[in-house]
Amino acid sequence: MRTATTVEAAGFESWSRQADFVIEAEKLGLDICWVAEAWGSDAPSALGFYAARTERLLLGSGVMQVGTRTPVALAQTAITLSNLSGGRFLLGLGPSGPQVMEGLHGVPFARPLARVRETVEIVREVVAGGKLSYTGSEFRIPLPGGEAVPMRLSMRAEHPVPIYLAALSPAMLRLTGRVADGWLGTSFVPEGAAEAYFAPLDEGLADSGRGRADIDVCQGAEVAFAPDEEALGAMVAGRKKELAFSLGGMGSASTNFYNRAYSRQGWSEVAEQVRERWQAGDRDGAAGLVTDDMVLATTLIGTEDMVRRRLRVWRDAGVDTVRLYPAGETMEAKLDTLGRAIELVREVGDAS
């Protein structure tokens, strides 16, 4: 198994401290660093900065939201970052949700599946280097009825550009299996993943004549090491508010893909109750409904032996790359947690 992490500006005191974290993570042997965008800083600017400060580490956009940039602008960004990093760039794309797309960018969230599919097709055509002529339901390039003719970029892609899709819904998972090089997942419960996630992913892979070996399954979770049961209890309790936010606050009142993902994995009743409490403004009440089992099932929190056993379950479920969100109050503490987790992933992977 490979190791990855995700960084965003909000998690550090300054850009220089975040860059220091990325540099040190590379020294620890981390394989991939994804840069989040969400509703904070943009990903490409930071990725260019980190590309100049690292040598081996793969760097990915985790993720850029489809619809906030044209497909060709995404392709230009991807080729630029790939070329300047010596082929170390991974293009992570996702549809986001109505709250961010409509509430922040003023872009309709309608037809996300078609928009993502056509964006991937256009990006691949641009990366291939030919003149672009595309007709779809969402994009038509060049626009018809005018004087424009098909064009190609004046620069060429010097390296392949792998495309990863962030997917939670069955339809987006099927699309990921059909067209993507990797799947960026979250809200992952390995015990329920076969039906909730892998069944539609495998359908898409089969449609494209591929198998699981042809796609990188990259799953993420918070990792934290507890020295004893008392400390573990405090960690689990602290995580409940964050999980309640995912279930109740991520997305709009009616559209929350995280809530739906947990519901498909056996917690439909609790997930709905948490959403209702959160939307009503009762944040503490929502967090109080989250069970210890929900936290432990969807994270890598525990004693070192517990985390090791959990990683074996992830490996056996089909995870290729473990995206680690290391706990810690300081950068040094985060790096210590990350280093311990990387060693455990290597140990578990080598034993497979």
Image (cartoon, rainbow, N blue to C red):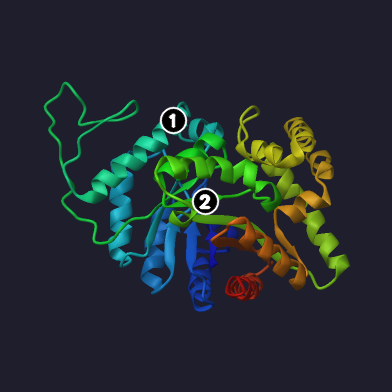
| Residue 121 position by quadrant | top left
Which residue corresponds to the image point at 49% horizontal and 39% vertical from the top-left? Answer: 174
Give 138 or 328, whichever is nearer the viewer: 138
Residue at the image point whose x is 46% and y is 26% from the top: 110
Residue at image point 76% right, 40% down: 267
In the figure, is residue 188 to the left or right of 244? left
User: Which residue is at the far top?
Assistant: 145
Can residue 202 be seen here? yes
Residue linked to disc 1: 107
Task: Judge whether 45 appears above or below 342 on screen.
Answer: above
Give SS at disc 1: loop
The front one of 45 and 1 is 1
Which mark sits nearer the N-terminus, 2 or 1?
Answer: 1
The amino acid marked with disc number 1 is Val
Q: What's the amino acid at mark 2?
A: Leu
Apparent side of residue 159 relative to residue 144 in the rendered image (left or right): right
Q: Is residue 292 left or right of residue 48?
A: right
Residue occupied by mark 2: 184
In front: 254, or 282?
254
Q: Relative to 190, say whether 53 is above or below.
A: below
Residue 281 image position (x, y, % from top left): 76, 33
